Amino acid sequence: MSLARDLADLGAVTSRLDTVGASSGALSNRNLVINGAMQVAQRGTTATGVGDTNGVYPTLDRYRFIVEGSSAGRFTMSQEADGPVGFNNSLKLACTTADTSIGAAERVFLQTKIEAQDCQAIGKGKTGAKPFTVSFYVKANAAKTYALEIFQSAHSRQCTKLFNVTTDWTRVELTFPADVDDGSSPIPDTTAEGLVLQFQLHAGSTYTSGTLNSSAFADNVNANRAVGIDSFYSSTSNTFFLTGLQLEVGDTATDFEHRSFGDELQRCQRYCQRHPSQDQADGGNYSLLGAAGWAAGASDANVPMQLPTTMRIEPTATFSGNWRIVHTNTASNVSSGPVIHDSYCSVSAVYMGATCAASLTTGQGVAINANNDTDAHLLLDSEL
C-alpha cells in the first residue's frame, strides 16, 4: 500500500513539473524558428519599395519575400518597437502601392526556412512521424484573413491553414498533422532547406481556385495553396505585424521560447553576417575589417578574416561603401575591391583582397578599414 501510494504521489509530482515546465517556457531548444522574436536585423531595420524583386531578404534576418507574377503592389518592411507583453520587436509590413486587379499568377508571401538537418525530430516521411504546432502573434489595421502554408521542398508536400488578424495583438496557434507520406520519404539530413513557413498575403486564381488543403499534408497542387485569403494589396491603409513565431514538435503550443539576443544573433550568423556588425557614429567611420594582413605586391593587399560563427555553406560576399588600406602608419584609398578570393575561403573564414594606388612593400603588414564611412560593410550570405 505504501509503495503504491508513493508511486502515485511521484507520478502526480512529475505531471505537475511537466506542466509547469511547458507553460513557463523552461524547456529549451524546442523552437525551430530562428529570430522568432524579431530581434536581429543585420541588413537594416527598414526597406522601402519591396515587392518588385523576388527572393529578397529586405530587413529582419531569416525573413524572405517571394514575389510571383507581375503585381504592381509595393510595401515597406520594417522592424518595429511594438509587440504584445513580453516582446519588444515585431516585423511590420505597410502597403504603399495597392493592386486590386489580381492577375491569376500573382502571389506574395513572407517566408522563413528551417534547415533540413534541424527538422529531423518531426520524423516526416517515416512511420511514427509527429505533428507539430506553429504559434505567433499578429495584428493589422483591420480584420483580415491570411494563411500559413508549411511546404516541404524535397518531396513537394504542403498543408495550409487560414488564420484571422484583428487590430489587437492576438496569438494564433495552428497544429499541423504528422506527414507519414509513403513511409520512406524523410526530410534529408542535410544543410538544404527542410520545412518552409510561408505566410500567404496575396494570391491570384492559380493559387486560390481549388479547395484549401488544410487537414493533411499532400502532394502540392497550386490551386489548393491559398484559398480563402484576403489581399494585403487591397489598400494602402493595410498593415501586418508579426512576432513570437514558434514551431515546435507536438500538438500543443507552449509559451514562446525566449532566447538571449546573443544566442539569436549567433544562430542568424550561420546564414548571414554583417562586418562590421553595425553602423557606429562614434569612431565607426574607420571601422576595421578583418585582421592584419600583408602586401602581396606593390599595390595589392591580402587580409584574412576568421568568422565568429561557422556558416551553412561557403558564403557569397557583397561589399558596400568606401574603404582604405592602412600600411606603415599611412592610409591609401582602395582603387579596386575589396573582393573575396573564393578559392581560399571556407565556411569558417574568408580571404579578402584589395588594391590601392600607393606603393606597398611585399610582405609588409596591412589592414583594410572603412574610409570615413559609417555604413561601409561586408555582407556574407549563405541563406537557404
Image (spheres, helix red, strand yellow):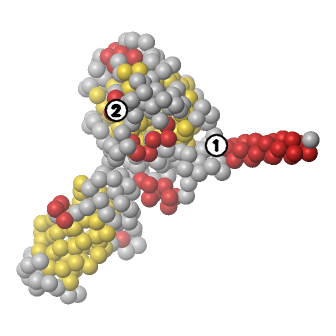
Sequence-first tag of 1 and 2: 2
User: Residue at the location (71% across, 44% down)?
Assistant: 18
| Within-10-Å neighbours for mark 2: few <14, some 14–19, many 20+ | some
Q: CA distance from mark 1 to mark 2?
A: 28 Å
Q: Position of residue 121 (x, y in %)?
A: 50, 41
Q: Quadrant of residue 68?
A: top left
Q: Position of residue 174 (x, y in %)?
A: 56, 29
Say whether residue 132 is left or right of residue 75: right
Nearer the camera: disc 1 or disc 2: 2
Say whether residue 214 is left or right of residue 298: right
Q: Quadrant of residue 375?
A: bottom left
The C terminus - image quarter: top left
The disc placed on residue 255 is 1
What residue type is disc 2 on? Ser
Say whether residue 249 is left or right of residue 267: right
What residue type is disc 1 on? Asp
Q: Considering depth in this image, is 34 or 64 the residue closer to the camera?
A: 34
Question: Does 235 sit above or below residue 276?
Answer: above
Task: Determine the secondary structure under disc 2.
Answer: helix
Q: Position of residue 281 (x, y in %)?
A: 39, 69
The N terminus - image quarter: top right
Question: Does 342 sit above or below residue 368?
Answer: above
Q: Which residue position holds label 2?
A: 153
User: Residue at the location (22% across, 78% down)?
Assistant: 293
